[in-house]
Image (cartoon, helix red, strand yellow):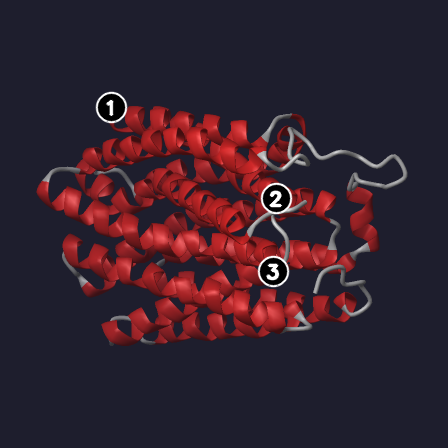
Amino acid sequence: MPRTKRTMVSIILIAWLAYLISYLGRSDYNACLLEIINDTGIARALAGTVSSSFAICNAIGQLISTIIITKISPIKVINIELLAVAIINLLFPITDSFAIMAILWGINGFLQSTLLCGITAIFVRTLKEPYLSRGAYLLNTIGAVGGMFNYILSWFIIRHFNWKLVFICTSTLLFTLAIIWYIIIPRLTRSNSSFDSQPKKDASEKTKFRFTELFYSPATVFAIAAGMFVGLLRESVSLWIPTYMNDVFELTRDMSVIITAFVPCLQVCGALLGGFIGRRSKDLFLLSSVTFAISGLCLILIMLMENASITITLIMFIINAICMTAVLTFMVSLYPIRYFDKKKVVFIVGLSNFFVHFGDFISSSGIGWLSQTKGWMLTFVVLAFFAFFAAVLCFIGAHFSKTEERIHV
């Protein structure tokens, strides 16, 4: 699979850009959540159902997309996804019904589930090491960069116009990116004779990954479970920080959004640092265990320092966000590439992301209800418990991972 450095870098950059713009098409609701609540007067629990709809449909889609990608060219799948998400973002602010909003955002979640599996399929078919690993963990910077860009863009638009224009601007970007993807990506992959709608199969080689194989790979079960807790803790931060800062410190809407945008800005460090350390570490599970424990300590400090220091609270949120991005890199990006044949990587990534977004679903619906009915202190006690429990799971997973054969360095 000959591929020049320039072409591989170009594929990574364009795929990264496609993922970034698509991320804007899913996180714009989170960025506008406080404004939507204040504008419509709905309860937090009801507002959280829109995010829950996205999360559960995205989780289910992660499994289905692993099948779709093997039947249809991932290039075409991603092009359709970009166009469809653009249309949904255009329709979303038109309706005043939260039921229709939840349906539209659920469809959005399903469509976006094809993105990571599709890009992973393109990467494993066109990239060689070390670009394959680099491309994989660079994708984990999307949440940070996309979150920062989206919060700042949303703040500016809401300040001067209204929240509905945020979705229209995102739709315009998606339409533009769909055209760029349609023109450039096929040209970059065309010269690679091994790239088609699905990889060629060797009759003597076992290429399918069956669920029963998980029983022979307990470390994989622990890695997938870690991904679920990452989704739960990560979404709790990204979705509810503006509301928390507004409730506890009584900040203005503008100040809440500006401060919140600063958190994902430093999440990039989590993805890059996670990739740098993870590629050099022999035990991704121990790294994840320590990182989850640090996250739990941060959440406890946030609870203990409630309404005492906005600076310490913000620092703890930032460290927690960096930790979750790092674990996502360890368990969802590097672990499948390291321990599975390339023809099984897409399935493992899809399965892992199913549980990541299942964690998102729990957080989207549960945290809104818990904070509204029981208060923020109990909410952070529950989140800290989840973080420490995940640390224990990863510590146990480290024992099983020592018996697995490492395929890639």
Give the residue at x 82% y 67%.
403
Residue 8 rendering spot, x and y as whole percentages: 54, 49
Density class for disc 3 (Cα within 10 Å; few <14, some 14-19, many ≥20) is few
Q: In which quarter of the image is residue 30?
A: top left
- Is disc 3 in contact with disc 1, using a CB cutoff of under 8 Å? no
Q: Distance between the residues labelled 1 and 2?
A: 41 Å
Q: Residue 94 carries which label?
A: 1
Per the image, label 1 sits on a secondary structure element best described as helix
State which mark lies toward you, 3 or 1: 3
What quarter of the picture does the N terminus occupy?
Answer: top right
Q: Residue furthest left?
A: 160
Sequence-earlier tag: 1 or 2: 1
Residue under label 2, please give it: 126
382 or 154, nearer to the observer: 154
Q: What element carries label 3?
A: loop
Q: What residue type is labelled 2?
A: Thr
Residue linked to disc 3: 130
**Above or below — where is 197 with respect to 363?**
above
Q: Which residue is drawn at 36% across and 67% down?
A: 317
> Where does residue 392 sit, x and y in percent of width and height?
64, 70
Residue 255 screen position, x and y as percent:
16, 59
